[in-house]
Image (cartoon, grey):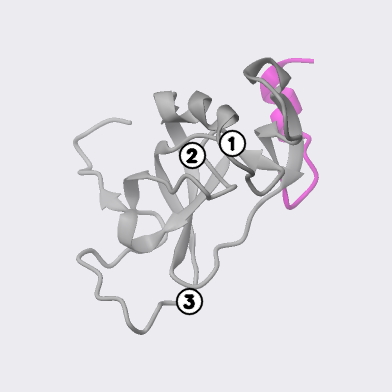
Amino acid sequence: MSRAQTLETLPPGKMWAIVWDKEQSEIKDLKLKQVDIPEPGIGEVRVRVAAASLNPIDYKLFGWGPRPLPHVLGLDVAGVVDKIGAQKPDVQLKHLLHVGDRVHFMGAIANPHGGFAQYAIAAQHMMIPIPQDVDF
């Protein structure tokens, strides 16, 4: 079965992600797993990931204190806005986002829904629009 066929056969509400799921683990312990597609909370946006890079902080996280597990690494992400959570009333946004907008963001270290997955979550105020003439 090809990778494309595998991705097509996921049940609704599921996605593929590279998951860190136990404390005291190493990079070699990361696993490709089928997990629930995360839902954005208040002030958050869900992005369908088009590109993610390996930032040095991603692998350095293994030596730092406890994290919410399971945890999907991947701080530097680009993709397309898929869903927008409720707006925080006390936050002024420089860019008002809409579903379908192309964006880039650097996620928060404690966020368990990083970019090494098909969908990622981040705070809306961290999103930067990508111009249409710029590729991912």
Total count of labels: 3
Q: What is the secondary structure assignment of the residue under circle 1?
A: loop
Q: Classify residue 78 by image quadrant.
A: top left
Question: Does the segment drawn in magenta span residue 7?
Answer: yes
Q: Which residue is mark 3?
A: 86
The residue under the point 69% across, 24% down is: 30
12 up-or-down from 86: above or below: above
Q: Which mark is residue 49?
A: 2
The residue under the point 43% across, 30% down is: 57
Is residue 83 left or right of 133 when viewed as pictured? right
How far apart in space, not on screen, are marks 2 and 1 (Cα)? 7 Å
The amino acid marked with disc number 3 is Ala
Q: Classify residue 79 by image quadrant.
A: top left
Residue 60 image point, x, y percent: 49, 26
Front residue (pair 45, 135): 45
Range drawn in magenta: 1-14
53 up-or-down from 103: above or below: above
Q: What is the secondary structure assignment of the residue under circle 2?
A: strand
The amino acid marked with disc number 2 is Val
How far apart in space, not on screen, are marks 3 and 1 (Cα)? 23 Å
